[in-house]
Amino acid sequence: MNAPARKLPLEGLRVVEFTHMVMGPTCGMVLADMGAEVIKVEPIEGDRTRHLLGSGAGFFPMFNRNKKSIKLNLQSPEGAEVARRLCATADVVAENFKPGSMAKYGLDYASLSAKHPKLIYASLKGFLPGPYDHRTALDEVVQMMGGLAYMTGRPGDPLRAGTSVNDIMGGMFGAIGVLGALIQRGITGRGQEIQSALFENNVFLVGQHMLQYAITGKAAEPMPNRISAWGVYDVFTVKNGEQIFLAAVSDAQWAVFCDVLGFADLKADPRYSDNNARVSQRDVMMPELRSRLEAFTAAELTAIFEKAGLPFAPIVKPEELFDDPHLNATGGLADVRLSDGPKAGQTARAALFPFTMDGQRLGVRRQPPMQGENTNELLQGLGMSAAEIAHLRSIQAVA
């Protein structure tokens, strides 16, 4: 007998998302990967991230898998009416436009929930309501004003983190809120609005440094200049100019570190008797370690540290992860079809969510959609006839 088809936890849930860029699409992708039917409402010209260059080139195929696409012109009365009808069929509506934008079309939470009190509405913004909520936010904006760029760069040289951390995590927190609201709706029968924001997400990320100051009275130094909590926790340049990250974060690990590398004299040195002593002696200890480790290749250190169970890491570029043996062995990458650009129709491997359910990764059930790929199907599902659909298309094309 064939095994029963795998049931995903959000099967049967309908989500309508009015989103663009990264934050909103990430929220929708979390729900889509977990089995929800997620309908992406795109403008007539298509989501702008389909055609971004440079660091934005991967946005659309990365954050829009497992979704359907419908193209609507919300600025036309007919398009906005269809969007409202679509939302009336939804369990969840998600949006990440400027405050007040959705109200112009009767697509805000107050308007929709008045007729559909069970609706859950995820509003993903730059800032939660308050003095800043009128500002235009970007990931880089909130990293600068929220302390993350200060902590990432060298002193006097604020530097944004190397990925869209606030957009991605802000979208994930929005999805977490939706999941909580779904549970509460099952108890009360009523929906609610969920709000998630870039700035508040960024503050959460640097919260540990805020509390560090509250506890110690000393401001946290930027990460390149910080006082490490551990004696050995660094990138080392070794033989042939290669680099590798090595760590020994406990006294037991320090003993093993010295044993496997043949540093018996350092193990016996009273200046390095425990972790806090090693931290206080880093100015003396680290130059000595760097000099000694130059005799090893990165491959030799990898073999030694892996066998000994010590923390280590090669310095890897993103494009090298396609060949990572662990990711490939565990199914951490899945093929997605590129829907736009010069490589449209070709496939590339994209990272899946970093958790399993019932022992399995959440995979790609539906490829990132072509522009408006499901428009007819969804309009027919609203009861529109072929003539009505043709009329809507003609109006929207010229609106």
Image (cartoon, rainbow, N blue to C red):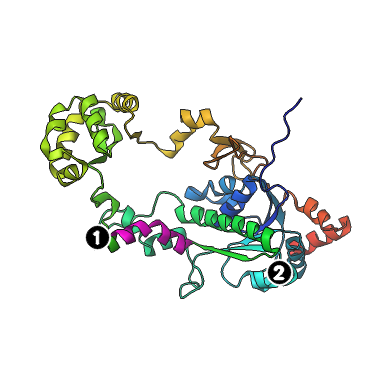
Q: Residue at x 59, y 42 (%)?
A: 342
Quadrant into which the N terminus falls:
top right
Q: Which residue is mark 2?
A: 112
Q: Amino acid at mark 1?
A: Thr
Q: Is residue 329 above or below residue 102?
A: above
Q: Residue at x 69, y 40 (%)?
A: 7
Quadrant into which the C terminus falls:
bottom right
Would you say the magenta stretch is mainly helix, strand or loop? helix
Q: Which residue is mark 1?
A: 216
| Along the line of sight, the residue nearer the viewer: 83 or 289 | 289
Q: Position of residue 274 (x, y in %)?
A: 19, 40
> Is label 2 in contact with label 1 (beta carbons under 8 Å)?
no
Q: Residue at x 35, y 34 (%)?
A: 313
Q: Is residue 226 left or right of residue 349?
A: left
Residue 395 is marked as none
Q: Which residues are magenta?
A: 198-212
The residue lying furthest to the bottom in this view is 131
Q: Position of residue 199 (x, y in %)?
A: 45, 63
The answer to whether any part of residue 248 appears in the image is yes
